[in-house]
Image (cartoon, rainbow, N blue to C red):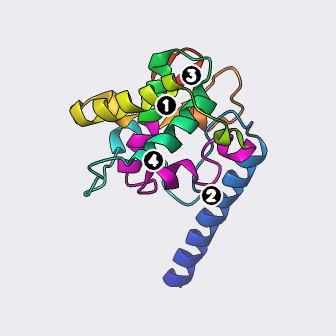
């Protein structure tokens, strides 16, 4: 009887998680970061977990791909905001709840609107590439206790429609973007 009750509770929780994910996808505009996977636990600021084996170096190909994303996501934003967008991707690569490479993080389903709308394929500019370079260098020099090391999300508060993204703890606002953990 206890086993049956436990299985029923697990199925109920899984179904609720799936339904919340489906609703968030229907109610989310393309300009914001969406829930990345329905069944994973939602992290609080206190539960940031890094992977044991973080990549030591980012390839030239990954830097270019990241520059495409930075340009598409932060065109018209201050330089500091472009660096922060790149830092979010790098932080995700090192975080246990996200994929292990820059490419996998960028192309994760529903993670970034430029992938969904195709604008990631447009050429990047020199400033976007420099922002990526600076984010990579800052990452190598940053202390592990810095809140910047924990940034995992960004969104535009004026256009965000998902209630989930607004529950994230905002660490800083740069230009039109809120950067959160």
Residue 145 drawn at (x, y percent): 23, 32
Tag of residue 62: 4
Q: Nearer the viewer, mark 3 or mark 1?
A: 1
Task: Tell me if label 2 and label 3 are in contact, CB under 8 Å.
Answer: no
Tag of residue 85: 1
Task: Tell me if label 3 and label 4 are in contact, CB under 8 Å.
Answer: no
Disc 2 to disc 3, how far (Cα)? Answer: 27 Å
Q: Is residue 43 visible?
A: no
At x 69%, y 33%, the residue is 31
Instruction: Work out whether mark 4 precedes mark 1 in sequence or the reverse, and give the earlier one.
Output: 4
46 with respect to 144 (left or right): right
Task: Tell me if label 4 and label 1 are in contact, CB under 8 Å.
Answer: no
Task: Tell me if label 2 and label 4 are in contact, CB under 8 Å.
Answer: no
Q: Which residue is mark 3?
A: 177
Q: Relative to 60, say whether 13 is above or below.
A: below
Q: Which residue is mark 2?
A: 17
- Residue 134 within the segment the image draws in magenta: no
The span picked out in magenta is: 88-117
Q: Nearer the viewer, mark 3 or mark 4?
A: 4
Disc 4 to disc 1, how far (Cα)? Answer: 14 Å
Residue 181 drawn at (x, y percent): 44, 35
Task: Tell me if label 3 and label 1 are in contact, CB under 8 Å.
Answer: yes
At x 58%, y 25%, the residue is 74
């Amino acid at each position: 009887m206890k086993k049956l009750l436990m299985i029923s509770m697990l199925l109920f929780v899984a179904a609720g998680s799936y339904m919340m994910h489906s609703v968030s996808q229907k109610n989310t505009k393309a300009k914001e970061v969406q829930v990345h996977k329905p069944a994973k636990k939602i992290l609080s600021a206190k539960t940031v977990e890094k992977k044991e084996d973080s990549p030591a170096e980012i390839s030239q190909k990954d830097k270019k791909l990241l520059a495409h994303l930075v340009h598409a996501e932060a065109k018209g934003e201050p330089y500091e905001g472009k660096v922060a967008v790149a830092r979010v991707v790098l932080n995700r690569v090192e975080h246990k709840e996200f994929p292990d490479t820059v490419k996998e993080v960028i192309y994760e389903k529903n993670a970034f609107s430029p992938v969904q709308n195709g604008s990631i394929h447009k050429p990047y500019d020199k400033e976007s590439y420099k922002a990526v370079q600076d984010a990579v260098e800052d990452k190598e020099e940053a202390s592990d206790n810095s809140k910047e090391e924990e940034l995992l999300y960004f969104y535009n508060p004026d256009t965000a429609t998902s209630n989930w993204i607004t529950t994230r703890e905002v660490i800083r606002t740069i230009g039109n973007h809120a950067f959160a953990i």
